[in-house]
Image (spheres, rainbow, N blue to C red):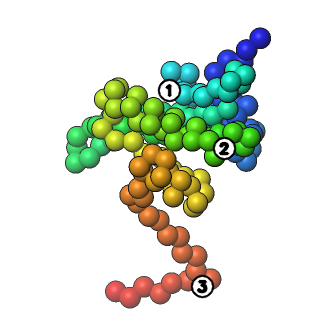
């Protein structure tokens, strides 16, 4: 018996990410949809890579635009370095364009992924964030 898209996606997520089980259950209960999912299969029919193309509405100066959010992009460790994700990213960008998305975005989980997504999908950092932790209260001057 072959596994469903959902089963394959959950299996790959558990292998590739260090997310706690409650998060995985929540994601696949509330966010996951098969019609937003791309899977790549090996010659033996096993799903070896996964990504979701989640639809979002961006609001810019009062106007709403359709956008796509790449989520859960992962390749089984035994199949990395073969260009699978690069091909899937191109397919995802094409699919999101076809559904009318004006842009696509993702939020890399680790710093090294910024370079990977730049090379694999043409993504570039658009926003930065810094967090400052102070050991003593700040003085404000008015």
Instruction: Check the image and report above or below for 20 versus 28.
Output: below
Quarter of the figure with residue 83: top right
Q: CA distance from mark 2 to mark 3?
A: 46 Å
Which residue carries the number 2 mark?
A: 80
- In this rendered view, identify the residue nearer to me: 140 or 116: 116
Label located before the other in sequence (2 or 3)? 2
Q: Residue at x 31, y 29 (%)?
A: 100
- View extreme (top): residue: 1
Between residues 16 and 69, which one lies in front from this camera angle? 16
Nearer-the-camera pick, 109 or 87: 87
Q: Nearer the viewer, mark 1 or mark 2?
A: 2
The answer to whether marks 1 and 2 mark residues whose Cβ atoms lie closer than 8 Å is no
Disc number placed over residue 17 in the picture, else none:
none
Q: Please give left or right for residue 20 compared with residue 72 in the image.
A: right
The label on residue 36 is 1
Quadrant of res 135: bottom right
> Circle 3 is placed at which residue position?
136
Q: Is residue 127 visible?
A: yes
Q: Nearer the viewer, mark 2 or mark 3?
A: 2
* Residue 63: percent from left, percent from top: 23, 40
């Amino acid at each position: 018996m072959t596994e469903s898209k959902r089963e394959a996606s959950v299996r790959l997520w558990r292998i590739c990410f260090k997310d706690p089980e409650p998060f995985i259950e929540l994601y696949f209960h509330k966010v996951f949809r098969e019609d937003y999912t791309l899977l790549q299969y090996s010659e033996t029919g096993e799903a070896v890579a996964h990504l979701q193309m989640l639809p979002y509405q961006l609001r810019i100066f009062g106007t709403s635009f359709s956008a796509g959010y790449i989520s859960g992009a992962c390749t089984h460790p035994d199949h990395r370095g073969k260009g699978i994700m690069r091909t899937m990213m191109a397919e995802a960008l094409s699919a999101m364009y076809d559904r009318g998305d004006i842009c696509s975005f993702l939020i890399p989980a680790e710093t090294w992924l910024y370079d990977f997504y730049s090379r694999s999908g043409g993504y570039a950092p658009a926003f930065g964030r810094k967090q400052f932790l102070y050991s003593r209260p700040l003085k404000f001057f008015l």
